[in-house]
Image (cartoon, grey):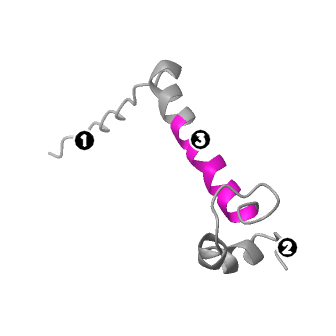
């Protein structure tokens, strides 16, 4: 006689607290703002670095994201 197979219990996922996520969210937020600055505004009116090295490195990404540069 066949025995019925009981369904396996679904694994429980522990919620992640805001205290655990907040430092990572702040870190990635600052990193994203720095990336947007270097792609969008560096080598312009608010340039922090001299020369055109940063401009040349992010030139294609600047156009891809819709930032005009010339």
Q: Name above or below for residue 26 compared with residue 32.
A: above
Q: Quadrant for residue 67, please give it.
A: bottom right
Number of callouts: 3
The residue tagged 2 is 68
Asked if residue 46 lies in the magenta stretch, the reply is no
68 relative to 29 in the view: left or right = right
Q: Name above or below for residue 17 compared with residue 3.
A: above
Name the mark nearer the viewer: 1 or 2: 2
**SS for tag 1?**
loop
Name the mark nearer the viewer: 3 or 1: 3
Asked if residue 28 lies in the magenta stretch, the reply is yes
Q: Quadrant for residue 14, please give it.
A: top left
**How far across and down, in percent of the image, does residue 48 sit?**
66, 55
Q: Main secondary structure of the magenta part?
A: helix
Mark 2 crowdedness (10 Å alpha carbons): few <14, some 14-19, many ≥20: few
The residue tagged 3 is 30
Q: What segment is highlighted magenta in the picture?
A: 27-40
Q: Name above or below for residue 3 compared with residue 48.
A: above
Camera-side residue: 34 or 64?
Answer: 34
Q: Residue at x 14, y 45 (%)?
A: 1
55 relative to 24 in the view: left or right = right
């Amino acid at each position: 006689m066949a025995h019925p197979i009981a369904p396996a219990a679904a694994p429980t996922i522990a919620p992640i607290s805001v205290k655990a996520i907040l430092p990572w969210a702040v870190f990635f937020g600052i990193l994203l703002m720095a990336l947007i600055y270097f792609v969008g505004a560096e080598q312009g009116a608010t340039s922090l670095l001299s020369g055109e090295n940063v401009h040349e490195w992010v030139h294609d990404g600047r156009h891809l994201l819709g930032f005009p540069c010339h």
